């Protein structure tokens, strides 16, 4: 009989597939191996006789660490200790948007906030953008029920900087899990040796959490500067309204974003500018590889080519993109 289930964990050649609240240990069918189809955590698969027969189409996929079909990203920040870093928060929001994963925002350690200033600021920035917001305290068990409701019936990934209380929140929902929590200084000493594997934990029958050491490569140096505004909902709505089609909304004439800058939050715009700077690194590298490609073909054909055609240019750009993807660009992980 063929059944369908979700891969929760992979350990060497064994795949642990969730099926009607049981976990079945499976192997991969030979033909999938031959086709070099890679099953990742989160994949919905068809199984027969404890063998994975087929991978169902993915809703989304994050390459490092490899995980698919995340229903929602819960971005966790602390209102204090560590200090709320809005640029980092916006980075996670954009990262999730890039990977087409819906976002919810959780602000933890609310027991430490003695005034409402931070709460007001958070609401004034993120509520108009349409994000669900929750304030919690894992220590004082504040709003943990609400958080559990948010997670119900879904596979969620919790992301956020080290020490904001992600493990503590999961433990608060289900103390039996007893995830390891550490204070902030211990964590930074942990370094980058932690394994990159992730698995899906069943926190309760209908709450699944992606347990990951962190997502790598959160810098936007893999996309073009012009693509960044698409990751900011409030900037994206001005798409096509600027005088120049390649407007980066920085200092250009007739820029619809700049004309409306008073309606855009400062920290959001500042984050936008930082990510554009990162994306410029990518553009530089593309240029570099593109040029290399040109010189190479000149030498290879042993005749001088004054210009390469637009089509060829695009091809070489594609090639360089592939090269960049293969290259293990900075393994910057934020825990
Ligand atoms: P993670 O790195 O995001 O998984 O953070 P942890 O769950 O390991 O928590 C880091 C530190 O923050 C630990 O010392 C926790 O006890 C503490 N912590 C977690 N949640 C809260 C909270 O709601 N309030 C306070 N005051 N401390 C918390
Ligand atoms: Zn513009």
Image (tube, grey):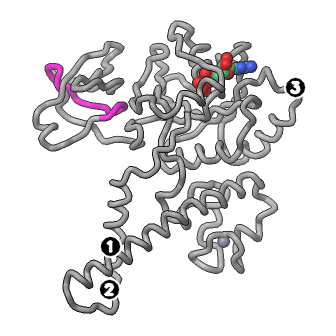
Give the residue displayed 60% in from the left and 62% down from the top: 276
> Residue 304 location, x and y as percent?
26, 92
Give the residue displayed 34% in from the left and 89% down from the top: 307
Give the Cα separation between the discs numbered 3 and 1: 56 Å
Q: Quadrant of ligand 1?
A: top right
Q: Is residue 326 visible?
A: yes
Q: Quarter of the image containing the C terminus?
A: top right
SS label for mark 3: loop
Magenta stretch, residue numbers: 40-51
Check if mark 1's residue and mark 2's residue have beta carbons within 8 Å: yes
Q: How many marks?
A: 3
Q: Left or right: 293 with respect to 231?
A: left
Q: Which mark is residue 114?
A: 3
Q: Left or right: 124 with respect to 25?
A: right
Mark 3 / mark 1, whichever is N-terminal: 3
Residue labelled with disc 2 = 308
Which of the two marks, 3 or 1, is nearer to us in this view?
A: 1
**Vertical arrangement, residue 42 with respect to residue 247, above or below:** above
User: Around disc 1, counting alpha carbons within 10 Å, would you say few (fewer than 14), some (14 to 19), or many (20 or more)?
Assistant: many
Q: Left or right: 138 with respect to 42?
A: right
Residue labelled with disc 1 = 316
Q: Is residue 41 magenta?
A: yes
Choose top left, top right, bottom left or bottom right for residue 172.
top right
Give the Cα separation between the discs numbered 3 and 2: 63 Å
SS label for mark 1: helix
User: Around disc 2, counting alpha carbons within 10 Å, would you say few (fewer than 14), some (14 to 19), or many (20 or more)?
Assistant: few
């Amino acid at each position: 009989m063929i059944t369908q289930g979700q891969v929760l964990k992979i350990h060497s050649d064994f795949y642990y597939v969730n099926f009607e609240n049981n976990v079945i240990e499976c192997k991969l069918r030979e033909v999938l191996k031959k086709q070099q189809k890679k099953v990742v955590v989160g994949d919905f698969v068809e199984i027969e006789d404890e063998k994975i027969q087929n991978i169902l189409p993915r809703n989304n996929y994050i390459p490092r660490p490899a995980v698919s079909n995340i229903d929602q990203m819960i971005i966790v920040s602390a209102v204090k200790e560590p200090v709320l870093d809005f640029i980092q928060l916006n980075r996670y929001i954009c990262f999730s948007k890039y990977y087409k994963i819906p976002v919810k925002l959780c602000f933890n350690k609310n027991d430490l906030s003695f005034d409402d200033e931070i709460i007001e600021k958070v609401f004034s920035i993120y509520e108009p953008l349409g994000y669900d917001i929750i304030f919690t305290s894992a220590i004082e068990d504040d709003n943990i029920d609400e958080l559990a409701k948010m997670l119900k019936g879904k596979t969620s990934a919790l992301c956020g900087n080290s020490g904001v209380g992600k493990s503590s929140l999961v433990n608060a929902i289900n103390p039996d899990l007893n995830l390891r929590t550490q204070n902030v200084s211990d964590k930074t000493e942990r370094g980058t040796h932690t394994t990159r594997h992730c698995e899906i934990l069943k926190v309760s029958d209908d709450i699944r959490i992606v347990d990951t050491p962190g997502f790598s490569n959160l810098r936007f140096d893999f996309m073009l500067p012009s693509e960044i505004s698409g990751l900011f909902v409030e900037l994206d709505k001005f798409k096509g309204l600027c005088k120049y089609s390649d407007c980066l909304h920085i200092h250009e004439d007739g820029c619809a974003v700049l004309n409306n800058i008073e309606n855009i939050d400062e920290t959001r715009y500042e984050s936008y500018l930082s990510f554009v700077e990162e994306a410029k690194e990518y553009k530089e590298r593309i240029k570099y590889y593109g040029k290399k490609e040109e010189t190479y073909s000149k030498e290879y054909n042993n005749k001088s080519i004054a210009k390469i055609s637009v089509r060829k240019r695009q091809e070489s750009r594609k090639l360089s993109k592939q090269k960049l993807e293969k290259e293990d660009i900075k393994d910057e992980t934020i825990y």
